[in-house]
Image (spheres, coloured by chain):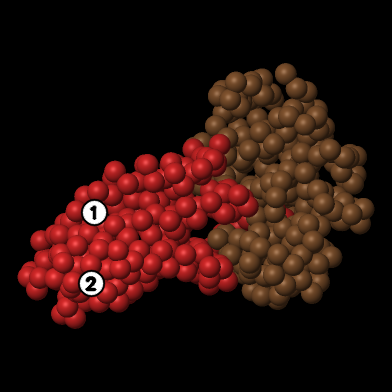
Amino acid sequence: MLPAALRAAPGANPSRLETGRGAMSELSLRGENLHVWRGERHVLRGLALEVTSGEVLQVTGANGAGKTSLLRALCGLLQLEAGRVSWGGRDVREDLPAYHASLAYLGHEPPLKADLTACENIRYWVGLRRKLRPPEIASTLESVGAPGLADRLVRTLSAGQRRRVALAGLLLLAAPLWLLDEPTTHLDAAGQQLVGRLIEQHVQAGGLAVSAVHHELAVSPERVRRLELSRG
Amino acid sequence: MSATATMLACRAEVPSALDVASLALARDLKLAFRKRGEIAQPLAFFAVVTTLFPLAITPELSRLREIAPGVLWVAALLASLLALEYLFRDDARDGTLEQYALCGRSLTWLLYAKTAAHWVLTGLPLALLAPFAGVALGAPAGAFPGIVITIAIGTIALSLLGAIGAALTIGTRRGGVLLSLLTLPLAVPILIFGARATELAIRGESYAAPLELLGAFAVLGATLAPLAAAAAVRISLE
């Protein structure tokens, strides 16, 4: 189950975003003519993409095709050689902190500290964005199939359990834009279904997601846009 | 509630910059106390180096007193450097730094908090330990406040300066060696003024002038170093 903040409400208009400056604009992520170099490799050559509210962009491709580079470029961790990324119709470079506050990025490895408990990890991670109450953390952990893990040190958790804790953090960030790099890594079949369900609920609630995957996401096909990257 | 409303709701409960920095500081302190070995390592290094000198040179207190400022400061500088290697290393490996960079809050503030935690865990204990090392080196009891305060202020400057080096060497192999090469030349003025202040304190003279210079380095570091470290972290994350 999603946190209350992310459940769709009848009559809500999720496709529009109130920006910090008071203007209303489309909830969409667009990349235009994206060029990224990694060392001597020209990884992304003039790539264009668009995802709007209610959609998930599923990015596939062989290892080294540039899936992670694309995600990192979209969230601003990687400098673009050329091109632009726009969020809500506005170039993200105009107000990078506001854009960052709207996105949740989950990389290959969950950003968890082995010597902190699952609850502490989430509090210190998500707490940078919003104030959290302990029951909220416990209920969200339960919703991702990780009940009873709140007080366990992350070093004692399996890779799949860590991934579930990270998914709980992702939900609690309550960001409209999800950028996910191999979100199903280390998860069993039930976990993979869970990821699909969470993404589905997120986009149904008006959010949008870009996910790099090796396997098809368990999301309704009508909500999925596909982008295949090739090497070279 | 829609994503729009979610975002607006979240903005309403956004923590202040001070809350965010406090959270980062609390996190680092909690982590450090769960990995006590890492805190103890620079302190043990400092204690061993300063107590080995009397054994290696001479037990004569008047001679030891002469070299005490240099020994205390070189040991404090190297101990501080030893701990700097851990400042950003684990956070870079597990993706925490990426989350800091993407949280929509000031990365400079967050790195400030991390550097403050580093000083609380290394600089402050070194300053508190220094009088005990001073006893072994023949420093009189009257010099203890001077030793504590000079090393405390000097290590603030060292932590801030070292944060830039630590940020620049994220992701490099044998980052510790590179970190030393980057930081040590810049730390020389701190070493000189710190040793001079400690020497004057041991002699029972006024050490205000070199202490003020150390303070100036600390203020300069506090003003510029987190900004430079944040820029370096962003580059290193690419």
> Which label was assigned to residue B59?
2
> In the visual, does B139 lie left or right of A159?
left
Quadrant where the image shows the C terminus of chain B: top right
Q: Is residue B230 visible?
A: no
Q: Colour of chain A?
A: brown
Q: Chain of mark 2?
A: B
Q: Does A41 sit above or below residue A153?
A: above
Separation (CA) of disc 2 from disc 1: 28 Å
> In the visual, does A31 lie left or right of A143?
left
Which residue is located at x 32 percent, y 57 percent? B77
Quadrant where the image shows the N terminus of chain B: bottom right
Mark toward the viewer: 2 or 1 = 2
Q: Quadrant of residue B206?
A: bottom left
Which residue is located at x 10 percent, y 70 percent? B203
> In the visual, does A55 lie left or right of B176?
right
Q: Does B166 sit above or below residue B116?
A: above
Amino acid of disc 1? Ile
Kind of element beneath mark 1? helix
Q: Is residue A114 visible?
A: yes
Q: Quadrant of residue B117?
A: bottom left
Q: Does A226 sit above or below residue B169?
A: above
Which residue is located at x 81 percent, y 48 percent? A185
- Point out the residue furthest to the left here: B205
> Which label was assigned to residue A111?
none
Q: Colour of chain B?
A: red
Mark 2 touches mark 1? (CB < 8 Å): no
Which numbered disc flags the more N-terminal residue, 2 or 1? 2
Amino acid of disc 2? Pro
Rate crowding at label 1 as few (under 14), some (14 to 19) or many (20 or more) other CA atoms within 10 Å.
many
> Which label was assigned to residue B190?
1
